[in-house]
Image: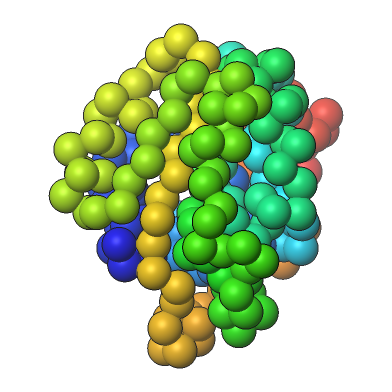
Amino acid sequence: MNYLECFRAIARHRTNEVVITSAGNSGQAWWAATGDSVASFYLDASMSLSTMFASGLALAQPDLRIWAFMGDGAFCMNPGMLMIERELNLPNLTHFLVSNRVYGATSNAALPNFAQNDYAAIARGMGLQRIFEFRKLDALERGLSQMTAANAPGHTFVVLEVEPFTASEQALEQPPFNGTELKYRFGRHLEAVLGCDVFGYRV
């Protein structure tokens, strides 16, 4: 699948989910697909922790539906995250593993063992049960409603096999917000939709 077309298809099926992206191509692609600056949090230098951040939110707010995106380059830094995700088994969290078989943020350097890496098999080995794999856009379009079912039993793990960014796609704009601005935009959105207190004060 084309990376951007894949993200655009997912964005078309988004309802009230908040989104956490990993550093690099997934943040660029989600920003290009949505332009969302409120209900999406674009982690910078997240080093494989986007789903851990998302897990904390999902655990604290079980009525909040969360999509977390991570490239396979980040995943390879910390595949043990699946042990935590399986133990928590949060039904309101969907982990999208974007597999382009390269380190997209470092000029598409190839991943070690890239041709043999089987991310769905790794997830099954960790005991995850709601596992989806999509290699073609039409299959993704057909499977999105089942994949994103609200509070279906257990944690959802989705492997998206996409092509690496082209040279022109690598030049796509990064989400144009600094960390402090992102924090307050996203936190105020959570306060509004959940009626919770994130920051403890109002300016």
User: Of all residues shown, which one is farthest toward the top?
Assistant: 153
Q: What colour scheme was applied to this rendering of the protein? A: rainbow
- Give the image location of residue 173, x and y in percent: 51, 78
Give the position of the C terminus as an image quadrant: top right
- The residue lying toward the viewer, choosing from 4 and 143, is 143
Residue at 72% in and 62% down? 44
Residue at image coords 42%, 83%:
166
Place residue 155 in its image quadrant.
Answer: top right
Which residue is nearer to you in this view: 118 or 103? 118
Quarter where residue 88 is shown: top right
- Answer with left or right where residue 21 lies relative to residue 200: left
Q: Is residue 151 depicted above or below 123 in this figure?
A: above
Q: Position of residue 159 (x, y in %)?
A: 45, 44
Task: Please identify the residue farthest to the bottom as the structure is shown.
Answer: 167
- Is 21 above or below relative to 112? above
Q: Is residue 117 above or below residue 193?
A: below
Residue 88 visible? The answer is yes
Task: Evaluate whether residue 177 shows in this view.
Answer: no
Residue 168, position as x, y percentages in the image: 42, 88
Along the viewing direction, whichever of 81 and 120 lies nearer the viewer: 120
Q: Is residue 142 left or right of residue 187?
A: left
Between 192 and 82, the residue placed more toward the observer is: 82
Name which residue lies at 24% across and 35% down: 143
Instruction: Name the side, left or right, on which 159 lies relative to 149.
Output: right
**Which quarter of the rendering shows the N terminus?**
bottom left
Q: Position of residue 67 (x, y in %)?
A: 50, 38
